[in-house]
Image (cartoon, rainbow, N blue to C red):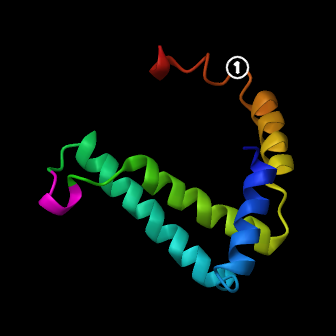
């Protein structure tokens, strides 16, 4: 599935099953919450925190998909074409960071 298709699929779902989009501010708060859930899983799986019983069955991929879902909602609501934005972002990184990481002593 392309990013464009994902944006359209989310929009179709919102406008049928979901009734309507939450406000942009509500979705921003939800995005923050979902990113926090990803952080929680990663801090337990890859960091020093131990798992609680209720955390042991949490699916990292599903939590990441929740983040993507809300990001796609926000893009749809604000008129952002994420395919175009992502391509432009790559161009920026290829210019700005062309040698930056290669020359970073911390990464060698």
**Residue 90: percent from the left, percent from the top?**
78, 36
* Relative side of 101 to 98, left or right: left
**Residue occupying image coordinates x 78% and y 45%:** 86
**Residue occupying image coordinates x 70% and y 85%:** 20
* Relative side of 27 to 33, left or right: right
**Residue 79: percent from the left, percent from the top?**
85, 69
Secondary structure at badge 1 equals loop
In the depicted structure, whether residue 37 falls above or below residue 3: below
**Residue 57: percent from the left, percent from the top?**
24, 53
Which residue in the structure is indicated by mark 1? 99
Q: Nearer the viewer, residue 66 or 90?
A: 66
Q: Is residue 8 magenta?
A: no
Q: Magenta segment range?
A: 51-55
The quarter of the displayed image where residue 104 is located: top right
**Residue occupying image coordinates x 53% and y 54%:** 65
- The reply to whether residue 74 is visible in this rendering is no
**Residue 35: percent from the left, percent from the top?**
46, 60
Q: Main secondary structure of the magenta part?
A: helix
In the depicted structure, whether residue 55 falls above or below residue 104: below
**Residue occupying image coordinates x 31% and y 57%:** 40
């Amino acid at each position: 599935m392309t990013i464009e298709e994902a944006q359209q699929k989310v929009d179709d779902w919102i406008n049928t099953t979901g009734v309507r989009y939450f406000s942009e501010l509500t979705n921003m708060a939800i995005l923050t919450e979902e990113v926090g859930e990803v952080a929680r899983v990663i801090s337990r799986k890859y960091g020093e925190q131990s798992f609680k019983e209720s955390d042991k069955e949490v699916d990292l991929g599903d939590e990441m998909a929740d983040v993507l879902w809300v990001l796609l909602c926000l893009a749809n609501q604000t008129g952002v074409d994420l395919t175009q934005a992502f391509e432009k972002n790559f161009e920026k990184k290829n210019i700005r960071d062309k040698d930056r990481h290669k020359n970073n002593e911390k990464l060698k």
